Amino acid sequence: MSVKHSLLALLYENPGHGYELKTGFERLVQGMWPLNAGQVYSTLDRLERDKLVESPGYDEKDRKLYVITELGKRELWDWLKQPVARSLLKDEFYFKYLCADLVDYEEKQNMIQKQKETMIKDILALTQLKKQMNESQQYSMKMLIEGALLHLEADIKWLDMILQD
C-alpha cells in the first residue's frame, strides 16, 4: 500500500492539512488500515522535498496546508497506470507450511485446521462489513471486500486439498 500515492490522491482536488489527510485516508479505507499521524507528516515532508506537493501557507487555525503540484499529478497518474506485482508464493502461512514439512512437524494437520478456522472467521467479518458497504453505497470498498472473499475461499479450498493429502 502506498501512503505516498494515497496522500497525492487525497490532495488531487483540494488542499489539505496533515490531520485532514489522515482522516481522509481512514475514511477512504473504511478504517480498515489505521494510519499513524507521524507517518502522514513524514510522508508529506518527503513529498514536499521531492516537489510533488507544496505548501501555499497555513489555514486560519495555523495548520500547514498542502496542494499537489503538476509533478505530483504526473507521479500519481504514472503510479495508477502501473500494474501491481503480486508475490504469489511469499505468504507467511505458505512458509510455515514448508517449514512444518521440513521438520516433520507432528501437529501439521492441526496447524492447517487452525489456519482454516481463522480464515472462516475472516470471511464472516468481511461478510458483515460487506453488508455495511451495501447500506452505505460504498461500491469501491465493496469490490475490495468481494476480492478478499474470493481469495479467502480459494485459500480454504487449498487448505482442504492439503488436509486430504
Image: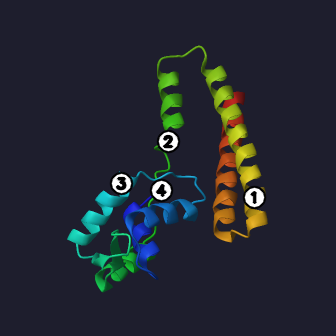
Residue at left 52%, top 23%? 101
Tell me which label, 2 or 3, sits earlier in the chain.
3
Q: Nearer the viewer, mark 2 or mark 1?
A: 1
Does the residue at mark 4 contact the one at mark 1 (Cβ under 8 Å)? no
Mark 4–mark 1 distance (CA, rounded to whole Å): 28 Å
Tell me which label, 1 or 3, sits earlier in the chain.
3
Mark 2–mark 1 distance (CA, rounded to whole Å): 29 Å
Residue type, numbered disc 3: Gln
Mark 2–mark 4 distance (CA, rounded to whole Å): 11 Å
Q: Secondary structure at mark 3?
A: helix
In the shown orientation, is residue 143 left or right of residue 135? left
Mark 2–mark 3 distance (CA, rounded to whole Å): 25 Å
- Number of residues whose C-alpha sits closer than 10 Å to that of mark 4, classed few (under 14), some (14–19) or many (20 or more): few
- Number of residues whose C-alpha sits closer than 10 Å to that of mark 1, classed few (under 14), some (14–19) or many (20 or more): few
Q: Is residue 93 above or below residue 111?
A: below
Residue placed under numbered mark 4 in the picture: 86
Residue placed under numbered mark 1 in the picture: 132
Residue 39 is tagged as 3
Does the residue at mark 2 contact the one at mark 1 (Cβ under 8 Å)? no
Q: How many marks?
A: 4
Q: Position of residue 142 (x, y in %)?
A: 69, 63
Mark 3–mark 4 distance (CA, rounded to whole Å): 24 Å
Does the residue at mark 2 contact the one at mark 4 (Cβ under 8 Å)? no
Q: Is residue 165 visible?
A: no
Q: Quadrant of the C terminus?
A: top right
Residue 91 is tagged as 2
Tell me which label, 2 or 1, sits earlier in the chain.
2
